[in-house]
Amino acid sequence: MISQQGILPAPQLDELIDLIKKIHGFDFSAYSKASLKRRVLRIMQNKRLEFYDLKHILVNDRAFFQEFLDEVTVNVTEMFRDPSFYKALNSQVIPYLSTYQHIKIWSAGCASGEEVYSLTILMREAGLSKKSFIYGTDINTEMLKEARRGIYSLKKIKSYAENYQYSGLKGSLTDHFTIMYDAATIHSELKPNTLFSIHNLVSDAIFNEFQMITCRNVFIYFETELQEKVLELFYNSLSPFGFLCMGSKETIRSDKFKKKFKVINSKENIYQKIAT
């Protein structure tokens, strides 16, 4: 079998990308080919599918396509992931944001919502929840459903609580959850400050103006051309002197955009838009 041999020639991968775009409207052409190929092969191996079978089922089975999408899009996230990032936000960004009358934040590629709720808690503890609103977007509808529910296992909450402590915030993470049996639900008063919706960074346009945008662990799966396209989207979506927060694993490599942002924190790759 092709999948067992670990072979997926470039023409077949391109054919698959074209098929998905034509049938489902998702364009993976500018995603990292190495990462996409690795994930497609994993699906073929797990499902014991030949390339022809994979194409057939992608065309005819919408539920399978959703499963396929879950696998090829990266949905690894957690609350207060990389606590040093939240420390930097709290000390270097929040004081500036507090001067605004209204604060709009966009968490791009939010997966199951943990980062959105982390930011909501961060704003609440800074006394800014009443004037802040956080948008969480993703291309994965199943992840967005989970995000809207805001229910996480107690096992996850335990590890999230450690992140919360290391981020330097006061109190306890469980102060913001209702514990029920083996799961925890985010407090209902935090939800009105959030909105989860579908947005495709590859093809969708500006939908609001923001004082801060977070996009972490996403760029590493994009080719250089797509990175520039998304940076253009973010730049145009930011208000004058707005913040782009990318985290320690990603950075602005484009010379064009290096000139358009001021570095606020070089370790956590937090940038501020230079107003023209």
Image (cartoon, grey):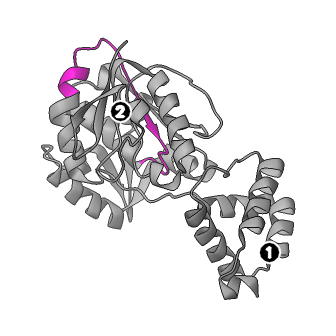
Horizontal side of 19 relative to 85 (left or right) equals right
The residue positioned 13% from the left and 46% from the top of the image is 168
Residue sitting nearer the eye, 117 or 199: 199
What is the three-letter code of the residue carrying label 1? Phe
Of labels 2 and 1, earlier in sequence is 1
Confirm whether residue 246 shows in the render: yes
- Label total for image: 2
Q: Which residue is mark 2?
A: 258
Residue 74 rendering spot, x and y as whole percentages: 52, 58
Q: Start and end of the magenta stretch?
A: 94-113
Q: Which residue is mark 1?
A: 51
Q: How far is mark 2 from mark 1, CA to CA?
A: 42 Å
Horizontal side of 259 relative to 14 (left or right) equals left
Residue 246 rendering spot, x and y as whole percentages: 35, 43
Residue 151 rendering spot, x and y as whole percentages: 44, 53
Q: Few, some or many C-alpha atoms within 10 Å of disc 1 (few <14, some 14-19, many ≥20)? A: some
> Any magenta on residue 196?
no
Disc ID at residue 108: none
Q: Secondary structure at mark 2?
A: helix
What is the three-letter code of the residue carrying label 2? Lys
Confirm whether residue 218 shows in the render: no
Q: Secondary structure at mark 1?
A: helix
